Amino acid sequence: MERERLAVNEGVNGTLQLCRHTLQMGGVKVETALAEGLPPVLGNGNQLRQVLLNLMLNAGQAMERSAVRRLTVSTAGTAGAGVELRVADTGPGIAPEVKDLLFRPFITTKRRGQGTGLGLSVSRSIVEAHGGTIRAENTPGQGATFVVSLPPAA
């Protein structure tokens, strides 16, 4: 895998350009809170954009029946001098019986024909190949947040 030094905020902004229209057509208000002065990460820009795109579009779909449809994408530095990226939605949250299965292949909560159940599994593989972690935080009835942590470029 070809890797280079990447500015995470640039990746976020580029990914938002790709999906903002789709999200807005679904009535989703997009907000960002991008920290300044973040260290670069070492990675493959296309693969990391794929992760972000998957998380953002999943969030948009999760909010289809929500009265408030807000997607918040934020970045911050971590104690280990890496970068944390958060994608939060105001959807129904993740059902407790599904939360532990989220990152397994072919697990989906979408209606038949709406998804393959591979997006989060592939995203986890990409993040881990970059030396990072991905996890889901959840408040049933109030939304879900996916947190990607990446180490700094050496």
Image: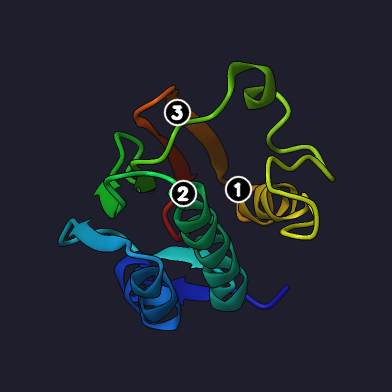
Tell me if residue 63 can be seen: yes
Which of the 4 image quarters holds residue 5?
bottom left
Check the picture and name the quadrant holding the N terminus.
bottom right
Tell me if residue 15 can be seen: no
Q: Residue at x 56, y 40 (%)?
A: 133
Under circle 1, the secondary element is: loop
- In the picture, the disc for residue 58 is none
Q: Nearer the viewer, mark 3 or mark 1?
A: 3
Q: Amino acid at mark 1?
A: Gly
Q: Amino acid at mark 2?
A: Pro
Under circle 3, the secondary element is: strand
Q: Decide which of 83, 114 is in the foreground and name it.
A: 114
Residue furthest right as drawn: 106
The numbered mark, 3 or 1, whose residue comes first in the sequence reads 1
Q: Residue at x 54, y 34 (%)?
A: 135
- Mark 1, residue position: 131
Q: Nearer the viewer, mark 2 or mark 3?
A: 3
Spot occupied by residue 148 in the image (x, y as percentages of width and height): 47, 45
- Mark 2, residue position: 151
Q: Residues within 10 Å of mark 1 (few under 14, many from 20)?
A: some
Q: Decide which of 81, 11 is in the foreground and name it.
A: 11
Residue furthest top as drawn: 96
Spot occupied by residue 79 in the image (x, y as percentages of width and height): 29, 34
- Mark 3, residue position: 137
The numbered mark, 1 or 2, whose residue comes first in the sequence reads 1
Q: Decide which of 60, 154 is in the foreground and name it.
A: 60
Under circle 2, the secondary element is: loop
Q: Amino acid at mark 3?
A: Glu
Total count of labels:
3
Q: Residue at x 46, y 41 (%)?
A: 146
Q: Residues within 10 Å of mark 3 (few under 14, many from 20)?
A: some
Taking 125 as reference, is 105 left or right? Answer: right
